[in-house]
Image (cartoon, rainbow, N blue to C red):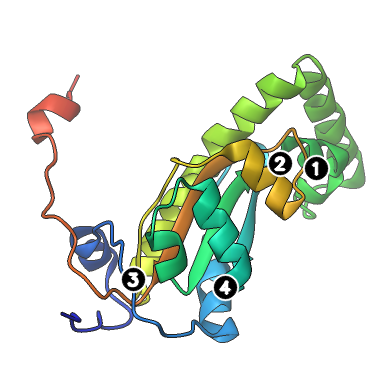
């Protein structure tokens, strides 16, 4: 049975408390304006040194979603959702464009110093190490994405159960990128499970 569409513009508290992983979605197109509204929020995600290594690939083409479903071992939420976002980290692109991450309010000398320091820091890492470092930052953006989706009246389900190499091939992504998640989303057409979370005294320690 179709559930009532979540109202738009939930508070942060409402969005977090109401978010569940949803695997069946209404067959309702998400507009370009709605997608833009989501990603205008997500791009404000903070990151170390403002490097912003996250990149988002939004798939709405039905044939491509069918191929993604195959790569996700047949999980039906991939084709049920009107849109699927691949959240990836691309640190090699960041390294190639470090000057774009430096705040324009700094003096030219300070900007050059920042680029030099960052280049030196990351040149001491392997491509794999840089990729893993960038993924820790990209996971922050994943949290922002899930909250923005929910807060603007949609539902989602984050996934890592898919063949990463096959998805790279389907989207012509470079080998070095790291996946944060595959996120099908849309208007929910089913209820998620009730929250089952650890109590605070297990996850929060005060010192």
Residue on which the image places disc 3: 151
Q: Which residue corresponds to the image point at 49% horizontal and 82% vertical from the top-left?
A: 30
In the orientation shown, which residue stands out farthest toward the top? 124
Residue 192 visible in the picture: yes
- Callout in the foreground (3, 4): 4
Residue on which the image places disc 4: 62
Residue on which the image places disc 2: 90
- The CA span between labels 3 and 4 is 26 Å
Residue on which the image places disc 1: 93
Q: Is residue 139 above or below residue 205?
A: below
Q: Earlier in the sequence, mark 4 or mark 2?
A: 4
Say which element carries label 2: loop
Q: Position of residue 195 (x, y in %)?
A: 13, 50
Say which element carries label 4: helix
Q: Is residue 42 above or below residue 140?
A: below
- The CA span between labels 3 and 1 is 30 Å
Picture quarter with the N terminus: bottom left
- Callout in the foreground (3, 2): 2
Q: How many marks?
A: 4
Q: Position of residue 163 (x, y in %)?
A: 55, 39
Cβ atoms at labels 2 and 1 below 8 Å apart: yes
Q: Nearer the viewer, residue 160 or 20?
A: 160
């Amino acid at each position: 049975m179709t559930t009532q569409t979540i109202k738009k513009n939930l508070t942060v508290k409402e969005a977090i408390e109401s978010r569940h992983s949803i695997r069946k979605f209404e067959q309702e197109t998400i507009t370009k304006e709605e997608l833009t509204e989501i990603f205008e929020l997500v791009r404000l995600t903070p990151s170390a040194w403002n490097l912003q290594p996250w990149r988002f690939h939004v798939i709405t083409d039905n044939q491509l979603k069918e191929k993604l479903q195959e790569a996700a071992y047949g999980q039906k939420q991939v084709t049920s959702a009107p849109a699927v976002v691949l959240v990836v980290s691309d640190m090699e692109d960041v390294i190639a464009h470090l000057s774009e991450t430096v705040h324009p309010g700094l003096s030219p000398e300070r900007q050059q110093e920042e680029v030099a320091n960052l280049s030196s820091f990351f040149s001491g890492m392997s491509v794999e190490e840089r990729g893993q470092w960038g993924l820790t930052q990209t996971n922050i953006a994943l949290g922002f994405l899930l909250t923005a989706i929910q807060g603007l009246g949609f539902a989602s389900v984050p996934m890592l159960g898919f063949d990463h190499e096959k998805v790279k091939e389907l989207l012509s992504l470079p080998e070095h990128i790291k996946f944060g998640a595959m996120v099908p989303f849309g208007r929910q057409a089913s209820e998620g499970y009730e929250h089952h979370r650890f109590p605070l005294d297990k996850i929060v320690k005060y010192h």
